[in-house]
Image: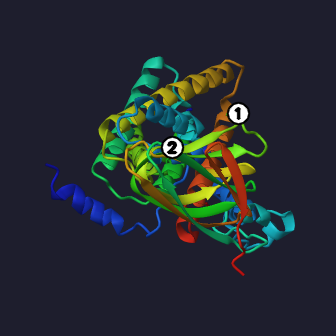
Amino acid sequence: MFGSKPRALALMLMLIAPPALLAHTIAGEDANYVQTIDGPAIAPFMYLGAKHMVTGFDHLLYLFAVIFLLNRPLQVLQFVSLFALGHSITLLAGVLFNLQVNPYLIDAVIGFSIVYKAFENMDGFASLTRWRPNAKLAVFVFGLFHGLGLATKLQAFDLSQNGLVVNILSFNVGVEIGQLFALSALLLTLALWKTSGNNAPHRFTVNSLLMVGGFLLSFYQLSAYYLGSPY
Amino acid sequence: MEPKPNNRPNIAIAAGAAACCALITLFVAVLPAEFGVDPLGTGRALGLLGLADANPSPFEKYDQAHKTDRTEFILEPFQSVEYKYYLQEGSAMVFSWTANGDLLFDMHADPEGILDEEGVESYEQTTGSGSAGIYHASFTGIHGWYWENQSFTEITVRLESAGFYERSIVLRDGGSFERDIEPIF
C-alpha cells in the first residue's frame, strides 16, 4: 500500500545515519518496560508521551519561544495547533513507515529551532536580512522536525507490531496532553511577567538566553553525532 | 517588539554572543562531563571527567573467579523442587535450563534470612519447557527457580549456569540442603 516512496526516502536518510542508533531520553525502567509491551497499551504510551514532553527541555524551550510574543489566546491557539499538527504528522509517519533518521541530527535541528524562533522574536530577520519568513509556516515546519525527533525516540525500541498504531496514537495524545500542561505553566509565567511593569528591555535578554540554550542543545547533539553516544 | 534602527548591531552581537556562550560551555563543561573529551584541559582542572566515567560501563569487575554449576532433577507427576543460588547484591549469573516436558515454574528471589513470602520477588512465572537469561541480583539472598510437574508423566529438568555465587540450596519434599559449588580453578 505504501510503496517505494517512503522506502526511497528512508534510504536517502539512512545515508546520513551512523550504524549505532542508541536510545536516549526515554531511559531506564521506562525503556525496559516499553520493550516488553506486546499489544495495545494506551495508558503507558500516553504517559510516556506526556512525560517526554514535560521533561524535554528542547520542546519546552521552543514552545516558550513560540508563545513569547503572543498576547491573544487565539494566536496562541493557532501557533500551538500548527506545531501540534506538524509534529503529529511526522511522529505517526516516522514510526509507521519506519523512516530511519539520525536522532542526533534531528535533535540538533530541534535545538536550532529554538535559536531560529528567538532570532525571529528579536526581529532579527526584519533588521538583518531581506528574507521575511512566514512565522506560521516556520512553526509548522519545525513542528515536522520535532515530530521526527519524537519518532526516533520510539523507534529506538524494538516495538511490537501488535497494537503499534494504537500505541503510537496513544503516545501522540500523551504528547499533546503534556504540551497542554507545559503550555499552561509557561503561559502563566509569561502573563505574570508581562503584567509586572515595563519589561520591554528584558525581552531582548530573554531571547538571547533562549538562543544560548538552543545553540547549546544543538552543539551537544552534534557532539554526540560525531563523538558517539555518551550513554 | 518593534524593530528600532539601533537594534541591528545589537541583534547580530546578541546572536554571536549566544553562539559563543554555548560553544564555551560546550568545550569547558559539556564535552568533558558527558563525552570524556577534554580539549581545553578544563575537565581535568574542574574534576568533570569523573562524570563521564560514571556512565554505566559494559564491564563489571569481580574479585574472584566465577563458578559453574550443572544439575539435574527428576520430577515425578505432581512433584516440585526449588533450586537457588546464594548471590550477593549486584552479582550476576548466566543460566539456561531445559526440560523434556512442560513445567510450571517461577524464577524468583528471597532476601536472605526470610523464609516466608515477605520480600519475595518473582521474575518469570509461567509454564514452559525451558528458559535462559542473564540475572543480576538486586539484593543479597537466594535466587533461583521453583519447578512443578503438573502432568502425569515423569519430567527431567536440566540446569546449567555460570556465575559469581558460592553455594546453592535445594528445597524438596519439605526439606532443604545446601551444597558448596567447586571452584573452577
Q: Is residue A189 placed above or below B41 in the rendered structure? A: above
Q: Are marks 1 and 2 on the same chain?
A: no
| Quadrant of the rendered image containing residue B43 | bottom right
Question: Helix, strand, or loop for circle 1?
Answer: loop
Specify whether A145 is left or right of A55.
Answer: left
Specify whether B180 is left or right of B132.
Answer: right
- Residue A186 coordinates in the image, percent (x, y): 60, 27
**A114 or B86: nearer the viewer:** B86
For this orientation, the residue located farthest to the bottom is B185
Q: Is residue A47 visible?
A: yes
Residue beneath label 1, please?
B118
Residue beneath label 2, please?
A33
Name the chain under label 2. Answer: A
Q: How is the image coloured?
A: rainbow
**A14 or A125: nearer the viewer:** A14
The residue located at (56%, 68%) in the rendering is: A228
